[in-house]
Amino acid sequence: MEFRDLLLIHPMWQLAFTLLALYAAWLGLKRLVSLHMGKIAAFSRPRHILIGKIVICGLLAGAVGGLITVRWAWRAWFITGPHAVIGIIAAGLLAFGLLLGVYLERRPAPRRKLPLIHGLVNLLGLALCLVQFITGSEVLEVFVLGE
């Protein structure tokens, strides 16, 4: 395996977990529809919890992997500029969303506001993950492909 191939593990990992995150968000959207829009929607809480935990832990592991990769490859921190900054913000939001989700899981009760905050925090984190595809492609062009 070549050096360049090793650098591609991070983006492939994050892509896989971001796609899975879209599924978790879709599951959560059903909860939003039933709680806040007054429509009947089947919400698979156990599936949302399982996929959500897997996704957020995977994305956080990928963020740490990205930091380690940058340090290992270029002997610097945050050399990727906006990609690193947005990644740190997204990781913070997703970690907070995970904590809220675990709280909601362990203390079930009829709630409206906390699940909404949980969903909005995670959706913002997911949106930043999608932005990372743009900044990440720039990183690949400059640092990996040398263009």
Image: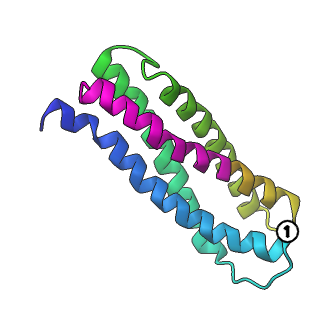
Left or right of 18, for residue 41 = right
Q: Quadrant of the N terminus?
A: top left
Residue 36 seen by the camera: yes
User: In what element is the residue under mark 1?
Assistant: loop
Residue neighbourhood size for the residue with mark 1, other residues' Cα within 10 Å, grouped as few (<14), some (14–19), many (≥20)? few
State the extent of the magenta-drawn residues as a range. 123-147
Q: Residue at x 63, y 36 (%)?
A: 92
Left or right of 93, for residue 76 = left
Image location of residue 141, percent across then percent down: 31, 31
| Residue linked to disc 1 | 109
Q: Nearer the viewer, residue 63 or 125?
A: 125
Image location of residue 146, percent across then percent down: 24, 24
Type of amino acid at the residue the image marks with label 1: Ala
Magenta span includes 140: yes
Q: Residue at x 46, y 59 (%)?
A: 19
Image location of residue 119, percent across then percent down: 72, 57
Left or right of 127, for residue 146 = left
Q: Quadrant of the C terminus?
A: top left
To which quarter of the image does residue 101 belong?
bottom right
